[in-house]
Amino acid sequence: MKETYTWNPYSDQPDISIPKKKRFLHHVKHFGSYISLASAIIQKALPILFHYRKYWNSLYKHPCFLGDPFAVSVSPERKRNERVVENLKETGASKTLVRVHSWEDEKLEECESLCRLLKQQGLDICIALLQERRDILEPAKWQNFIDEVFSRFKKFSSFFEIGHAWNRAKWGLWDHKEYSNLSLPAFDLARKHRVKLVGPAVIDFEFHLYPPILKHRPFDIASSLLYVDRVGAPENKQYGWDTRRKLALLRAVVDQSHPKLIPIWITEMNWPLKGTGKYSPVSGDPNVSEEEQASFLVRYYILCLASGFVERIYWWQLIAPGYGLIDSRSEPWRKRPSFHAFKTMVTLMKGSRFVKKLPHPRFEIFIFEKQKDRFAVIWAQDKTNWGESAIPFKVTKVVSRDGNRLSFSDNQIRIDGNPRYIYFT
């Protein structure tokens, strides 16, 4: 009996069926790889924990320039690429990511057409190379794929992410040694084509996989698919770790695993949506309402970017019925609240400078500067703290999460789970 991989076009991910016995025998056969993994982690544990503590204690205590870190991924849309690019431009994002599947040679031309349009509009493109099980079993196939993608797409992009979510068996790889082998040919080919490599594209909170990979695979950019949707709001904890603590740990792990100090990109994240059925990539609790998705999106970006630990963040993706900023199930395409929230965030925050985070018992208050403007981004996670409240500034303007001007009186502003942009003198 063999494992089967079938692409699910509704949720943009594989459906997988692997016999448990086969996976168990694989792990037994390669038990030594887990010993080497444990050894790599143990060797780095104390330096990582030392630097994590340092980063955690300094979190939000130092100003940092945000620049232009806002990115949204896109996919080809069957003769509607112009429409995709038009909507992407409207978000204000100047950076995007396009996936290229190793098993779909016939779609390379379609991806190339999309990248050509994106480049013509001045968008910065990262190309993600996605693998399947055959790529580890037939290394020559994968190497030829990398060579062809670098050759065809280097005129559009200098950055190529190698592999995707490989720490999930449904993406075709079963352990870190297989990813190490998969990524190896990319380095010689990157030198040949003069491109830069992004990786290791680990999904979720599994940072123990970075040390053995980055030690031997010196990527130019460290990437993480840092989803936090399974615990709901980005401030919620998973095993005691919220998004902020995860960021400090990720920065410490990368710094102590790679021979150089390199940037970190979050190349994929989102919140899937309730009521979207087969279009959602997950079932149950991770699915949220459209309003929650929009608020969580902004809060995630603020929490991450104000830390100074990550350089850019890609939302996956612009158009997707189950989780995208736009729902394409009917005409005209419907822009969700998250589309307007993202657009507002980019408009107001691109080119801004994070100044400080104000301590407050009820609210999250982040202070930014942009040219002559000073503004705070404020929200309250706990619903018991929602309501009208006096703001400790002389307020001049209030903008909603979705870009609407809000009225106020005597510095009294309604604070809830929706971030607001409060300008002050």
Image (spheres, grey):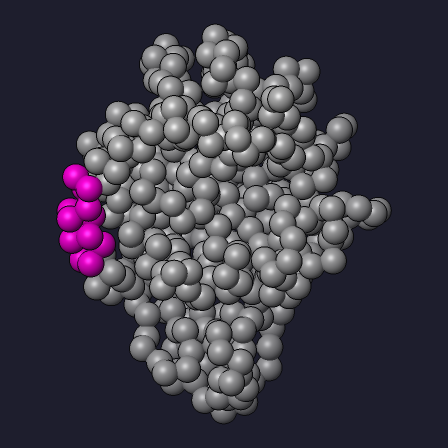
Image quarter of residue 244: bottom left
* Relative image position of residue 167 (x, y in whole percent): 45, 36
With respect to residue 115, does 39 lie above or below? below
The percent coordinates of residue 384 (x first, y second) are 51, 85
Q: Is residue 47 magenta?
A: yes
Residue drawn 60% across the image and 73% down it: 405
The residue at 60%/49% (across/down) is: 91
In this view of the protein, can residue 32 be seen by the observer? yes
* Residue 424 included in the magenta stretch of the image: no
Image: magenta residue range: 42-54
Which of 369 and 292 lies nearest the eye of the viewer? 292
Screen quadrant of the N terminus: top right
State the predominant SS element of the stretch in magenta.
helix
The residue furthest bottom is: 410
Q: Is residue 387 left or right of residue 63?
A: right
The answer to whether residue 122 is left or right of residue 333 is: left
Residue 114 falls in image quadrant:
top right
Whether residue 119 can be seen here? no
Compared with 224, 325 (above or below) is below
